[in-house]
Image (spheres, grey):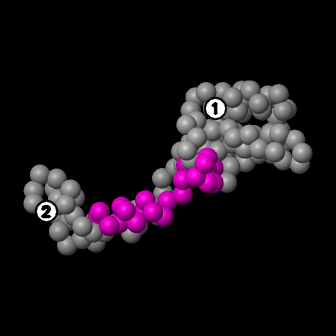
C-alpha cells in the first residue's frame, strides 16, 4: 500500500488531468490501486486542502462522488491570441502613460471575448449549479 502523501499526490495529478470533466471517485481509486476507504480519506483530505471539489452523483444506481480540480495548470494556449503580443505599441505601453492597458480597446475586447467563451466553474453544467454557494 502506498503512503498517503504519495497517494494524495498521485490522486491530485490524476484529477487535474481529467480537467473539466472530472473523474468518479471509484474509478480513480481503481486506477491508483487503492481501497475505497483509503481513497475516500484521500479525497476528503484533498477537499479540505482546497485542491479538489467533490460533487455527489448517482452512477449505476449508487451514489458516488465526481472529483474536479479547483484549478487547472496554465498553458500557452491561454494567451496565444492576446493582442499585446503583436501590438506595435507594446514597447511604449505602460499603466502610467497614455498608451496603457487600462484604456486599450483591443485588450478589453479580447478579455471580454475570453470571458464569454470560458466555461463555468470546473464541473458546473447549468445555472442552478453555478448559483450554489459551495
| Segment colored magenta | 107-129
Direction right: furthest residue = 61
From the image, tell me which residue sits under label 1. 46
> Which of the 4 quarters of the picture holds residue 114?
bottom left
Mark 2: which secondary structure? loop
> Which of the 4 quarters of the picture holds residue 83?
bottom left
Q: Provide the major secondary structure of the magenta segment.
A: helix
* Relative to 55, 26 lies left or right: right
Considering depth in this image, is 58 or 74 the residue closer to the camera? 58
**Residue 90 coordinates in the image, percent (x, y):** 20, 65
Considering depth in this image, is 124 or 114 the residue closer to the camera? 124
User: Is residue 2 at all visible to an observer of this figure?
Assistant: no
Categorize mark 1 by other alpha carbons within 10 Å: few (<14), some (14-19), many (20+): many
In the picture, the disc for residue 8 is none
Question: Which residue sits at x=63%, y=32%?
Answer: 47
The quadrant of the picture occupied by the C terminus is top right
Q: Is residue 125 magenta?
A: yes
The quadrant of the picture occupied by the N terminus is top right
Amino acid at each position: 500500500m502506498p503512503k498517503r502523501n504519495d497517494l494524495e499526490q498521485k490522486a491530485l495529478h490524476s484529477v487535474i488531468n481529467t480537467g473539466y470533466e472530472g473523474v468518479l471517485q471509484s474509478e480513480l481509486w481503481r486506477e491508483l490501486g487503492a481501497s475505497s476507504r483509503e481513497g475516500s480519506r484521500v479525497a476528503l483530505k484533498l477537499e479540505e486542502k482546497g485542491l479538489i471539489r467533490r460533487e455527489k452523483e448517482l452512477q449505476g444506481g449508487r451514489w458516488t462522488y465526481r472529483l474536479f480540480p479547483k484549478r487547472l495548470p496554465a498553458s500557452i494556449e491561454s494567451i496565444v491570441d492576446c493582442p499585446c503580443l503583436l501590438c506595435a505599441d507594446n514597447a511604449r505601453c505602460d499603466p502610467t502613460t497614455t498608451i496603457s492597458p487600462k484604456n486599450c480597446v483591443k485588450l478589453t475586447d479580447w478579455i471580454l471575448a475570453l470571458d464569454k467563451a470560458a466555461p463555468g466553474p470546473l464541473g458546473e453544467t447549468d445555472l442552478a449549479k453555478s448559483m450554489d454557494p459551495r
